Image (tube, grey):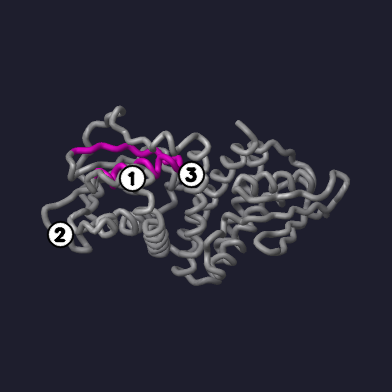
Amino acid sequence: MSDDRRSIEAQAYIHHQYFLGLQLMVVMREGPEAVGDWMFRIFRRQHEDKFLASFEKLGLSDLPDAVACAQYHTLSNSMGGVPVEYMAETEKKAWVRFRYPRWMYDGPTLCGVPVEASRGFLKGWYAQNGVSLKNPRLGFVCVSEDMTGQFGLCGYFKEYDHELSEEDRLQFAPNELPPPFDADNQPAPPIEQWNALRLLKANRNYAVDYIRNGIRELVGVIGRDRALELGKSAARLTGLQNRRRLSETIGTEDRGSLEAARLLAAMFQGMGDKAVVKGTRDNARVTINHGGLRIARGLTAEGRQDLIDCWIEIWRGVVQSHRTFMDVDVSQIDDGLEWSLSER
């Protein structure tokens, strides 16, 4: 794998880890209701940003609504590294089944997230599909959830013969099972538009979007000061915990400021940003000129600043996890940042 691809893959990994950690921190510090409200807001925002805009890109516009929705969730999640299976029962009833391990609650995270999180994203996205498609007869029926000890998230999109009330757009039928899986009937993205590199970037962007939307929606749930407190803390811990994995992926050593700067620069380049390291192995102080800041593109001024303030803490954690003790100073310049790493 090329250096660029390793960096892109590493960015997908670290943002995924940050989202997992932030979920657990919100659950532990704020409780189940807060995380449920937060998931609702994240998934409703992502639905409004992504759902209709992606239909034509994925070649789904001419399909029946229930089938198109099921194929959309299979394709969009699979491209983000999330295993999902599709089973069409009729043109008006089509299933999705998420397979383990669950990306959203990877590893033991699953044991620490309450069912309110599942209900939040089902209401935020799945129950909104019919509204977005202007089909008031389209709803989603959930037959299994992750936190209930069944067989994982599973359900079907169904077009009814009557219009649905807001409450009926999401229903639960825990005794139903999906039809048999058919490996030859799984949707795939148009090959001519989705080469291996684009799919790798889609995997990264999938994880990054949860952080871009997660921080600003958390502000709306628990207030700005508390959201930034938790967002920064989870970011710092994520960087500390995962530096070794990132170093092994990128190919840097557990040494001083120059090696730490090279690791950060490679990671920033994996976002599509510009990063130039200034300094030599003999210098105890090294700087990185970091431009582009893809993580914050398109955000309002306040949302951009909140996100950057949290995001910086990932990389502080990464640096401070090295054996050499270093201070990390960050200044904002133009559309980017200047990082200064000084050995103690």
Q: Nearer the viewer, residue 337 or 121?
A: 337
Residue type, label 1: Tyr
What amino acid type should be assigned to the residue bearing mark 3? Ala
Q: Earlier in the sequence, mark 3 or mark 2?
A: 2
Q: Nearer the viewer, residue 171 or 96?
A: 96
Give the spatial CA distance, label 3 vs label 2: 35 Å
Mark number for residue 163?
A: 2
List the residue tagged with mark 1.
Answer: 72
Q: Earlier in the sequence, mark 3 or mark 1?
A: 1
Residue at 37% x, 59% y: name it: 48
Give the image quarter of residue 170. bottom left
Q: Is residue 5 left or right of residue 135?
A: right
Quick one: quadrant of the N terminus? top right
- Quadrant assignment, res 95: top left
| Image location of residue 207, percent across then percent down | 50, 49
Residue 112 rendering spot, x and y as whole percentages: 44, 51
Q: Position of residue 177 (x, y in %)?
A: 21, 39
Q: What segment is highlighted magenta in the picture?
A: 67-89
Classify 10 Å Cα crowding around label 3: few (below 14), some (14-19), many (20 and above).
many
Q: Is residue 293 left or right of residue 66?
A: right
Q: Helix, strand or loop at disc 2?
A: loop
Res. 275 in view? yes
Residue at the left extreme?
161
